[in-house]
Amino acid sequence: MSKNARVQEILSTVQKIKDSKLSVTDYFKQNEVPFSRAQYYNYCKTLKKYGEEGLKDKRINGNNTKLSQRIKDYILTIVDENPALSSAQLQANIFDKFNTTISKTALNCFRASESLTKITINISEYQPQKSGGGEIFTFLVFYTNIIDIITKTITQRLDQIRQTESLTQTKSFEPDHPEVRDHGKFTREYNQQEDVRCNRFKSIDEKIPLKNLLSMNIFLKSEKTISRYNLALLCLPLVTSNGKSSRVNRAKGNDLKYLSGYNYKDAALDKYLRELKYLKISDQLIIETAKFWMDFWRDGQKEETYFVCYYIDGNTKPLWSSNRCYKGKATMLGRVMNCLENVFIHDGKGHPLYFQTFHGHADLGKHALNMVTKLTQMLDNPSAHIQVNRIIVFDAGGNGVKTLRGFANSDEYYITILDENQTKDRKFKHLQLETRYKYGTADLVDCKIELVDSSEENYIYESRAVIVNWDNNRKAVIVTDVPRELLGESEIVKKYFDRWPMQEKIFRDEKSGVNIHRIVGYGKKIESYDKMDERHRKICETITKLKLKLKIPLMEIDAIEAKLTDLYQTERPLREKSIIVKGKRILSEADAVNLQECESKINKCIRQINKIKKEYKNDFDKFKKSLNEEKRLRDKDKVYRIDTELDQIMTCFKMSFVNLCSFFLNECFDGEKFELLTLMESIFQLNGSASVSNDRKIIDLEMNPKEPILMDKLYKGLQILNMMPVYDLDGRLIEFK
């Protein structure tokens, strides 16, 4: 086919498709077309951009030009003189010399055959690049080496999976060839199929056995590339408004180019996160980052005393799903709904160290001691520091007597506060003399308190308590098992109320700054809800017993209700004959009399039913309540369990982000407190530029004239950072100008 004939055929076919009343998809299904549907859109785009000229075949213009001996000799000579000459420059020189266009592919093949590879000459001059305040954060990432810990954890998991049998089994899967995709895979129509849509949100545990692990790109990535991805994920709060990778495609997301060294798009980060999810790495990532930050803060502060406090708090994240999932009270919204809950452990300075994610409501009292015990067993190294006593501090949400009793056989102490309904005066005994609070305006009374365990009948738990009578007439009661010989009442009260400045306020800022309160992607797995099934079984047994007990009155009521059914059928035609005028029923005299008699009989039957129920009032009330409860619990023996894998992975990165910000404030601002959003908006989002060479990167930040005091503090902080020798992923020394 000639060139012109080919172009004319394409033009006529494209015009026929446009003129057809059928959609593009239907046209291709019903007609023979010399090219594919995808190619049709390419032709339309080409015609719009270049016109008919863009359809002409230009492959013969240079691509088939063979290298003559003269050109080969010229290439050998010029490349020998300048080994750093690129193929593009060489192509231009050949065109100027011989008026011939040689393709870059042909030039590269010839250079490879003659070993004329390009030699890169180090350029000592600095090249300008865009930069900004976010480079302070990446500086801290490289200084603390947290990026190495995360990357090492992932690479170790990859090596572990490579050696497992599950990976060898995946080798039997058929490769996904392009010709297979042409028959329906990975197209919009394929993704809209019902089975595909149903499988998309399945639990990760159900997907992994069917996953071809060898097909995941993460197994082909180098350690340096994985580090770049991890650095981009650490920087997400800086370049997005909500910590989601979907915001990376917005204008601010372009800052990733200088923060991580590559301008990742949403699709790339999303795919990387999904592959991390298939690795089931979240638990190990939590452990390794927790160990790192525990050692980091302990070695850096060196303020360890005889007592170390761990503050525990929960964060409920609402889950917007129409399916039944485990529920809890979402405090942000103030109502019970589908949710996940993170339980965090902070150290005495408010730094988040460790966390776990639970489905629905997480009972702090039930999980607090187990979490701390697990944390200390896995991560603590007694030989590295002096032996200390740990105090677990938690709020009234976990002060159940069953929980407090659990500390009896534990090495940890506890401090918590009681609710108002637990502080009746008659529960106190052995009251000591009133003393003044050393750290505030209150009077303290050391005493003992008796608490009853609601889960075990007649069990009385005795504990030490401190009554706090504030000068503003408010009252609080602190409960602890720390002996009076170790800590006085003032120290007990102070360690509890340090929650606010040390942990609760900081934690509140963290949640808003890095969006910890948002759920990150999930899958669903339906499972039996044994607790609800047991409750339904018990309520059904109660209903059966009540039916036996009320057998006779129920039979009498059934007989009366049968009469009522007949009366209702008689009443309805009479009502339908009537006309309502100005709120009054208009009816013939005979029909009005019949309707009145019918209504009297109905009311009489209703009074008889009420009389029977009144004789057995308590049983009928319980029967009615049980029936309503049974209806509520019906078909609730199944519930969806939400995957927490991806959410825990992202929370690890966000938790490290918070610790890095705390380290920055400690080192450069003498421990001054900033809200996380203020730190990000006033410092990390500063504009600037960088001068980059092969061995050095000098960052020049543009100071904000509207905040002169903060800029002066930042200038001093940057001088401190310049005293720390830090290198980026490309081995360049980082300095701030």
Image (spheres, rainbow, N blue to C red):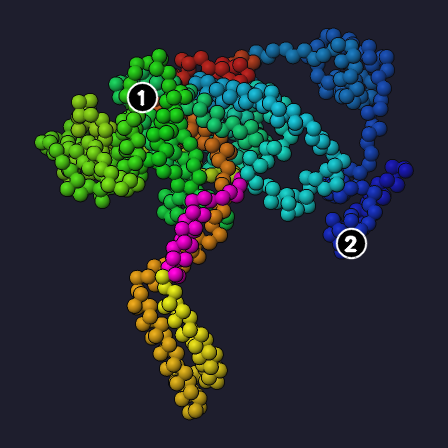
Residue furthest toward the left?
Answer: 433
The alpha-carbon separation of the residues under discs 1 and 2 comes to 73 Å
Q: Position of residue 200 (x, y in %)?
A: 59, 41
Residue 230 within the segment the image draws in magenta: no
Q: Quadrant of residue 715?
A: top left
User: Left of 104 or right of it: where is 163?
Assistant: left
Say which residue appears at 78% left-offset and 37% top-offset: 54
Name the quarter where the N terminus is drawn: top right
User: Please, is residue 76 above or below residue 644 in the view?
Assistant: above
Q: Position of residue 177 (x, y in %)?
A: 73, 32
Range drawn in magenta: 523-548
Looking at the image, which is closer to me, 138 or 712? 138
Q: Residues within 10 Å of mark 1 (few under 14, many from 20)?
A: few
Residue type highlighted by circle 1 = Asp
Q: Main secondary structure of the magenta part?
A: helix
Say which residue appears at 46% left-offset and 15% top-offset: 726
Q: Residues within 10 Å of mark 2 (few under 14, many from 20)?
A: few
Q: Which residue is mark 2?
A: 20
Q: Position of residue 299 (x, y in %)?
A: 35, 15
Helix, strand or loop for disc 2: loop
Q: Is residue 494 visible?
A: no
Residue furthest toward the right?
Answer: 1
Say which residue appears at 52% left-offset and 19% top-offset: 152
Name the quarter where the C terminus is drawn: top left
First reached walking from the N terminus: tag 1 or tag 2: 2
The image's mark for residue 670 is 1
Helix, strand or loop for disc 1: loop
